[in-house]
């Protein structure tokens, strides 16, 4: 490969190597691969995978490096393949399908697509990348209407373990098409996503910041939103609320990203009527709304995500707050730079119905089980010496929350893989436990030597 790709293979000590090996959301995931390969076509990827297979060389694939699981998108034992150069953005003549490269961020996509008057189901934070988002399902502000981001994919260009380049869709390889929607990197390397576009227009949206004096009212507003008849039942309304804990001071503040592309914005009255530190909520272009989050993931801290699921109810909101807040302050008050965010992501029944009607996916949540909350615990800190303390806290507090939720009938068996942490097992919960066997059979069919289980060992694996 060094002879064939002298301009695409980067070695330690080069500025390209330094840039690409540092390109991760969290400093905890920065590793030292033997070298970095930066392909710009599916053919390049196919040649690389064939070389890895024949030499039994370990590798990792990085889109935009959002996952905080160490080793998911880098390696100390092999080659890091970065998809940075794969930045295709093309629109079909009808403007109904957009083709996107895996090396893009969603803000880049939104800025590009805005003049077409169309929308796509992409990430809610500006720095999030296209590839990992779609392969992990993908929570979009439009999901209440159209389902997971993955449900919008009409075709995947996929490079398999054998180096074949496949066009995977509902008619060519329907089993693989289903498994890729939520299956992460277990089936190959996706080098192009052809996604459905939807009618786009200005939206009612913005970011609201609250100080500690508004927390009680903020929690009450959130309880109302997730209760029957609240905003969770309006497919055109979405909210991304965060409760932020500062362990050193023992205080809690909050913020919320709100979104509506319908005609009734009353779902947010309980939030917009509160006393705020700041608010940008108004009618605006969608890309301008997402640009408000451009500072998220500034990549200068150590961060970790963990995830779980609860039934959507006011009781679940209270349980999350009561279980985590006090313990976070006690456990982390002396940790330098520590902060904790509780990101409470409502997923309504209409979302799950839209996912089903689009053809389904490996995640396969049953609308009949009602709405849910995808809860993300997000911890940030400064020093590597505190890594073990943070991991122990995050894992123990999530176990405590799960046990408490089960005890009162509020647990929902779902872990959103794009927010999952080390040691969690999202695939075992897909389809209430039914999807995993089918996913493994599909993996065996298209990757019979289990290359993406053994030679790409990082991230969440299906197992054999």
Image: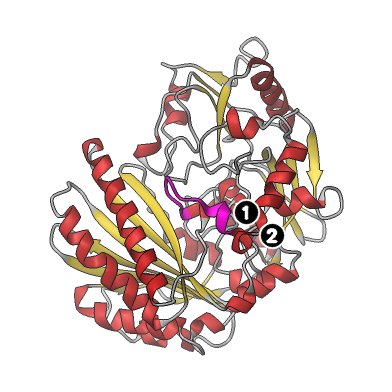
Structural distance between the alpha carbons of marks 2 and 1? 7 Å
Between 41 and 107, the one lying in front of the other is 41
For label 2, the residue is 361
Q: Is residue 421 magenta?
A: yes
Q: Which residues are drawn in magenta? A: 419-429
* Label disc, if present, on residue 204 of the rendered structure: none
**Where 130 sits versus 307, above or below?**
above
Query: Between residues 1 and 415, which one lies in front from this camera angle?
Result: 415
Q: Position of residue 131 (x, y in %)?
A: 60, 46
Q: Residues within 10 Å of mark 2 (few under 14, many from 20)?
A: many
Is residue 21 shown above or below 317?
above
Residues under numbered marks 2 and 1 in contact, where contact means CB atoms less than 8 Å apart: yes
Horizontal and vertical percent position of residue 383: 22, 39
| Residue at 37%, 42% in the rendered image | 26
Name the N-terminal-most of marks 2 and 1: 1
Q: Which residue is mark 1?
A: 182
Position of residue 254 in the picture relative to residue 193 (left or right): left
């Amino acid at each position: 490969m060094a002879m064939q790709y002298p301009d695409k293979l980067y070695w330690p000590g080069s500025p390209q190597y330094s840039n690409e090996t540092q390109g991760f959301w969290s400093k905890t995931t920065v590793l030292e691969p033997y070298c970095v390969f930066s392909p710009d076509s599916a053919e390049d990827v196919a040649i690389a995978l064939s070389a890895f297979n024949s030499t039994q060389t370990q590798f990792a694939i990085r889109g935009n490096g959002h996952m905080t699981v160490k080793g998911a998108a880098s390696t100390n034992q092999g080659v890091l393949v970065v998809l940075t150069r794969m930045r295709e953005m093309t629109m079909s003549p009808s403007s109904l399908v957009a083709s996107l490269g895996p090396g893009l961020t969603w803000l880049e996509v939104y800025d590009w697509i805005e003049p077409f008057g169309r929308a796509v189901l992409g990430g809610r934070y500006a720095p999030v990348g296209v590839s990992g988002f779609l392969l992990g399902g993908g929570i979009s502000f439009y999901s209440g209407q159209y389902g997971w981001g993955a449900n919008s994919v009409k075709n995947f260009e996929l490079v398999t373990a054998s180096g074949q380049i496949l066009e995977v869709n509902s008619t060519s390889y329907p089993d693989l098409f289903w498994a890729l929607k939520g299956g992460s990197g277990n089936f190959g390397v996706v080098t192009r996503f052809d996604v459905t576009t939807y009618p786009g227009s200005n939206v009612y949206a913005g970011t609201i910041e609250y100080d500690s004096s508004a927390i009680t009212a903020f929690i009450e507003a959130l309880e109302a939103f997730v209760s029957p008849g609240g905003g969770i039942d309006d497919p055109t309304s979405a909210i991304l609320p965060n409760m932020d804990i500062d362990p050193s001071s023992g205080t809690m503040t909050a913020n919320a990203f709100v979104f509506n592309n319908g005609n009734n914005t009353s779902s947010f009255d309980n939030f917009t009527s509160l006393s705020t530190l700041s608010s940008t909520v108004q009618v605006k272009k969608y890309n301008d709304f997402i640009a408000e989050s451009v500072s998220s993931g500034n990549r200068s801290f150590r961060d970790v995500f963990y995830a779980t699921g609860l039934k959507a109810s006011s009781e679940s909101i209270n349980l999350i707050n009561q279980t985590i807040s006090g313990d976070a302050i006690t456990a982390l008050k002396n940790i330098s730079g520590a902060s904790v965010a509780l990101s409470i992501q409502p997923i309504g029944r209409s979302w799950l119905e839209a996912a089903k009607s689009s053809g389904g996916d490996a995640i396969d949540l049953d609308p009949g089980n009602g709405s849910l909350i995808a809860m993300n615990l997000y911890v940030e800190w400064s020093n590597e010496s505190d890594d073990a303390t943070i991991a122990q806290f995050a894992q123990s507090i999530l176990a405590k929350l799960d046990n408490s939720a089960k005890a009162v009938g509020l647990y929902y068996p779902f872990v959103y893989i794009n927010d999952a942490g080390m040691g969690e097992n999202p695939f075992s919960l897909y389809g209430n436990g039914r999807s995993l066997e089918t996913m493994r059979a599909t993996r065996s069919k298209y990757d019979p030597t289990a290359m993406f289980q053994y030679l790409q060992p990082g991230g969440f694996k299906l197992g054999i």
